[in-house]
Amino acid sequence: MIPLLRPGRLIALALAAAAIIVPGLSPASCSGFCPDPIVAADGTAVSDRFWFFHRELGREGAITVRLAAMTGTITYPPPRHDRIVSGLVPWAKTGIIVKDGLRQGSSYAALMMTGRHGLRFQHDYLHDAAVPGTARWLRLTRSGDVITGYTSADGARWDRAASATLKGLPETVRVGLFAASPGDLTLRETGLGGTIEEVRFTQAVGVFDHVTVEGSAGGWGSDSVGSMNETDWEKHHNASGVVSKDGTIKISGTGDIGPLPEEGARAIESSLVGLPLALLILVVLGARSAKTVATATFVTGLLAIGTVILAQSPDSLLTAFRVIVGCSLALALCTVIAHGLGRFRLLLGVALIALPAILTAFPLLPDPVAEWLLRVTPAAGFAIKQTLVEYPQVTAHYAPSTGYHPLPGWAGMAVLGGVRTDRHAEAR
């Protein structure tokens, strides 16, 4: 019998494939339903949920407001979790915005006050710039595709804050006031020192007066971009929306406008939760079998990982190719390393290769320890699957257990390749 076709090896390869495919195609990680991600024009998955008080704006025009007050609510924060408190999360935001319609993911530019990061000028989800000062008079102008923000301390003398070119804006866009507030994120420590995310509902409220719009036609509309008014707080205390009285506009909203999708959208990383278990099976197989099993491991990885990734209809085929081929290559290299570990290769392979991957994939270890393991062990190679990016304007838990690797993909593969080269040299 051909060595590769021995029943035990075929069973191990089939189990490894199943460990990847079964959880990868299961909707359980999204509580039974995985919504399609919101994507910007460039295909980036984004958040785009806020309350919008808006009207039409032509190719030339401006909106001017004074931000009279900004308040907010945070529900059940630690340590007691029994109170609803007044307060703003760091990236709560309210201000003025020009947006290409009400569709989630459409192009925009906004000038805003935030909870703890001062004035900001943001556009098209990825771009964020700090605006000096604490001025409360805000203005956005439109000239064709160019949106420019200005601030003023008194409504008379204006300073240019920043500008952005939003290519392809239609003749008529929407302009107005907005409010958004992402969830309050804290980390709860587990028994071994790992941390689990806890996110609570928050709401931001902006109060504006001296609202004027130039170059506009039609009346005001009030809409949520994305779903809102579904929580008990909104239903029974303060519904997100707009209240206009005596020249003052009060706008309340939740959600976020930014470069990371809100909870529920499924990333590639979350689809490959079975990869550590598959690695364990393949490391055991590699330690006990001939080096030729590496080729079978690579092919198995291509089929299993490819099935999971392509089933999601990825927006970027280049990214899908990188993840499928890169992870398959990493699995194959790990089996080669396991086989070259000497007399105790089974024990060493599990301890040095599979165990770090398993321990860092789940919130078991303190984040610094998990990051260290993913810098110096062969598990570093699986950074090749990372698609998530750390953005300073988004509060998130950037840790191995949430899919963030400390090394870029090429560096992780270099660590894995270096280990493989060293072991190969020792074997000779």
Image: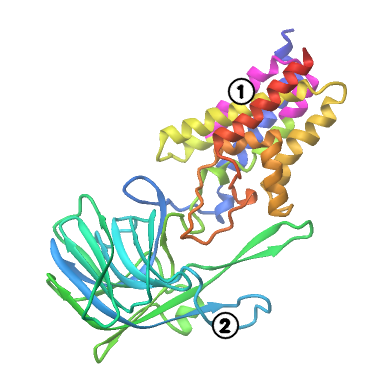
Q: Residue at x 68, y 76 (%)?
A: 79
Q: Could you tell whether 60 is left or right of 272 in the image? A: left
Q: Residue at x 59, y 22 (%)?
A: 299
> 284 and 71: which one is in front?
71
Outermost residue, right direction? 343
Residue 272 location (% of width, % of height): 59, 40
Tell me if residue 11 can be seen: no
Residue 19 location (% of width, % of height): 66, 36
Whether residue 302 appears in magenta in the rendering, the answer is yes
Residue 281 location (% of width, % of height): 73, 31
At label 1, the amino acid type is Phe
Q: Residue at x 72, y 8 (%)?
A: 2
Magenta residues, start to end: 282-307
The image quadrant where one finds the C terminus is top right
Q: Is residue 191 above or below residue 151?
A: above
Residue occupied by mark 2? 84
Outermost residue, bottom direction? 246
At label 2, the amino acid type is Ile
Distance (Cα) linking label 1 and label 2 = 53 Å
Query: Which of the numbered marks, if any, corresponds to residue 298?
Result: 1
Tag 2: Cα neighbours inside 10 Å, few (<14), some, or many (≥20)?
Answer: few
